[in-house]
């Protein structure tokens, strides 16, 4: 009976949380439009709102001392985003064209966040230092997205790169315009956004507690509950939207959406709460997910830059790498004494296959 109740709470909590997060995204976009935010900042705002379920689930787990669940939700969700938003989106679309400046602009920040996340999870730097390191890249990135050409000219550090940055931001906004068409916000949108935020938080907490309870009853490792189950469930709305847009030839915004979502996940869902509650001792399984997050981010960006977009072949490789990641995580989570081979060999295979793919001459693209 208790198991049935937990299952119902999990399913209802997931449905309510994801549905409310959709309403939260649309209302925040309208509010941002009313405030005159740029397309780039609207995209970041939408990503933050869409990340509310995983961020809330991660914060809840970390606050209760379930470090592997909390870290797993955030980092596992980021790995899932790369496979579902970029990989599956490219498979459905056949090819997603991207501007190289956009890839570099968002990619540098995305890789930096993944590196800092890995270093922090390994226990090499404290959470506070990791948070400062991420903000040192994220804040200038947000400033550049929000600044127009005239404002960029007034930023001393940006003057040398003014033309390049202005073009990159314009190209990113052109990609985001395909998916962001908010109506002009009204006063009631603020009230709806506030109400939906409360609903998302409450439903996500219930979902996390039910999932953890079910995992305990069925002896499912915490890292599987967080890094696979909750990570995938909380990311479903973004994944469905990515496939829908890709099928209609409007998938160009998926790279910016993925990288922004992942950076905000790490910042708000892992580093900030870890500063307050701590993250506990390093765990081999959490380390493994963080390594995969970095490796898959670099692989996806490398293929995207080479091809000026994401091809179907690259999408298949990214999805395949995610499946290998799942297998490796499953083996290490359930093995009584997992050897280093279960973690290292799959990574070596994926890196080698990706290196071989990158070394091949670029084929004809649409």
Image: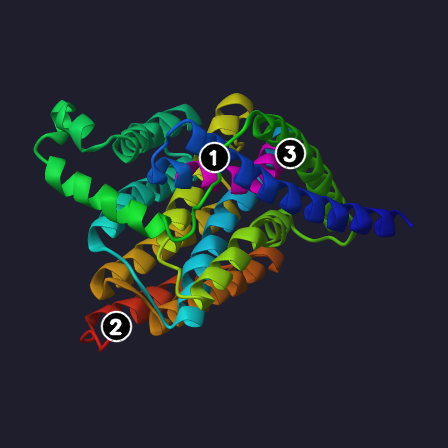
- Determine if residue 63 is in view: yes
Q: On the picture, is 157 further left or further right than 1?
A: left
Closer to the N terminus: mark 2 or mark 3?
3
Q: Which residue is mark 3?
A: 196
C-alpha separation, residue under disc 2 versus residue under disc 3: 47 Å
Q: Main secondary structure of the magenta part?
A: helix
Of residues 310 and 342, which is closer to you in this image? 310
Is 334 above or below relative to 158? below
- Determine if residue 284 is in view: no
Q: Which residues are magenta?
A: 44-61
Closer to the N terminus: mark 3 or mark 1?
1
User: Does dot 3 land on a helix, a strand or a loop?
Assistant: helix
The percent coordinates of residue 213 (x first, y second) are: 76, 44
The percent coordinates of residue 215 (x first, y second) are: 72, 50
The percent coordinates of residue 137 (x first, y second) are: 29, 32
Q: Residue at x 86, y 52 (%)?
A: 4
C-alpha separation, residue under disc 3 versus residue under disc 1: 19 Å
Residue 184 circle label:
1
Q: Which residue is mark 2?
A: 356
Q: Residue at x 43, y 33 (%)?
A: 33
Of residues 243 and 234, which is closer to you in this image? 243
Instruction: Please say if the residues under marks 2 and 1 sit with CB atoms less than 8 Å apart.
Output: no
User: Does dot 2 land on a helix, a strand or a loop?
Assistant: helix
> Mark 2, mark 1: which one is toward the viewer?
1
Mark 2 Cα-neighbour bin, 10 Å: few <14, some 14–19, many ≥20: few
Q: Residue at x 35, y 40 (%)?
A: 39
> Mark 2, mark 3: which one is toward the viewer?
3
């Amino acid at each position: 009976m208790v198991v049935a109740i937990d299952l119902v709470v999990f399913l209802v909590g997931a449905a309510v949380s994801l549905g409310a997060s959709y309403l939260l995204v649309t209302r925040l976009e309208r509010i941002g439009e009313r405030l005159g935010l740029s397309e780039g900042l609207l995209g970041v705002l939408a990503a933050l709102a869409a990340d509310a379920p995983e961020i809330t689930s991660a914060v809840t787990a970390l606050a209760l001392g379930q470090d592997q669940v909390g870290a797993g939700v955030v980092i596992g969700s980021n790995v899932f985003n790369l496979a579902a938003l970029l990989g599956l989106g490219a498979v459905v679309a056949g090819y997603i064209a991207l501007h190289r400046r956009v890839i570099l602009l968002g990619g540098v920040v995305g890789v930096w966040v993944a590196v800092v996340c890995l270093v922090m999870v390994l226990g090499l730097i404290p959470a506070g230092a990791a948070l400062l390191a991420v903000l040192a890249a994220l804040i200038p990135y947000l400033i550049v997205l929000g600044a127009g050409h005239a404002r960029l000219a007034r930023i001393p550090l940006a003057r040398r790169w003014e033309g390049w940055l202005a073009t990159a931001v314009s190209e990113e906004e052109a990609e985001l315009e395909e998916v962001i068409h908010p109506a002009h916000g009204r006063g009631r949108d603020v009230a709806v956004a506030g109400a939906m935020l409360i609903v998302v938080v409450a439903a996500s907490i219930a979902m996390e507690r039910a999932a953890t309870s079910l995992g305990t009853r069925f002896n499912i490792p915490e890292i599987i509950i967080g890094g696979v189950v909750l990570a995938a469930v909380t990311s479903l709305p973004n994944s469905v939207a990515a496939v829908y847009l890709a099928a209609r030839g409007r998938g160009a915004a998926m790279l910016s959406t993925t990288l922004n979502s992942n950076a905000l996940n790490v910042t708000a869902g892992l580093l900030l709460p870890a500063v307050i509650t701590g993250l506990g001792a390093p765990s081999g399984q959490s380390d493994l997910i963080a390594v995969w997050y970095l490796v898959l981010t670099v692989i996806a960006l490398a293929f995207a830059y080479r091809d000026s977009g994401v091809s179907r072949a690259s999408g298949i490789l990214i999805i395949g790498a995610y499946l290998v990641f799942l297998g490796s995580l499953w083996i290490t989570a359930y093995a009584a004494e997992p050897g280093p081979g279960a973690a290292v060999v799959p990574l070596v295979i994926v890196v080698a296959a990706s290196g071989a793919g990158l070394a091949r001459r670029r084929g004809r693209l649409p």
